[in-house]
Amino acid sequence: MSEEKTVVIDCGDSLNISGVGDLYAKLLTALAEGLVITLNVSKIERIDAAALQMLYAFSKEAAEHGNPIDWSDASDAFCRGAQLLGLAPKMNIEDNKA
């Protein structure tokens, strides 16, 4: 029986277009390695539409590979931003919010 390895990726307190490239590279590496990905979005106070769109696109890609994203204790600001863009239900955020 093989054990799945998990990686927790901390998104910090602010996520915008200038930081999505590095974050996306980390996410793709984790996906390629077959790791279970938990995104710690608990500290996010500010997030822009570009960052949310990238996270949505990645969560969709990960789900297609059978590796849905776990949103660790999503902050109110993160949830509010995702809801404003209509992405919260598509990203399965509310079901994962602790």
Image (cartoon, helix red, strand yellow):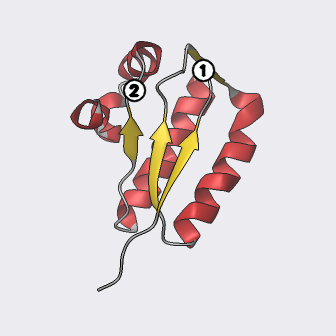
Left or right: residue 22 compared with residue 45 = right
Which residue reaches farthest left?
95
Q: Which residue is mark 1?
A: 48
**Numbered circle sitting on residue 84:** none
Image spot of residue 12 (x, y percent): 62, 28
Quadrant, the C terminus: top left
Nearest to N terminus: mark 1 or mark 2: 1
Image spot of residue 1 (x, y percent): 29, 86
- Residue at 35% x, 25% y is 86
Mark 2 residue crowding within 10 angstroms, few (<14) / some (14–19) / many (20+): many
Tag 2 secondary structure:
loop
Front residue of 57/95: it is: 95
Q: Give the residue type at disc 1.
A: Asp
Q: Give the residue type at disc 2.
A: Ala
Which residue reaches farthest right?
18
- Residue at 40% x, 36% y is 72
In the image, residue 63 sits, relative to residue 57, either above or below, namely below
Q: Which residue is mark 2?
A: 74
In the image, residue 64 sits, relative to residue 8, either above or below, namely below
Image spot of residue 28 (x, y percent): 61, 60
In the image, residue 19 sits, relative to residue 48, either above or below, namely below
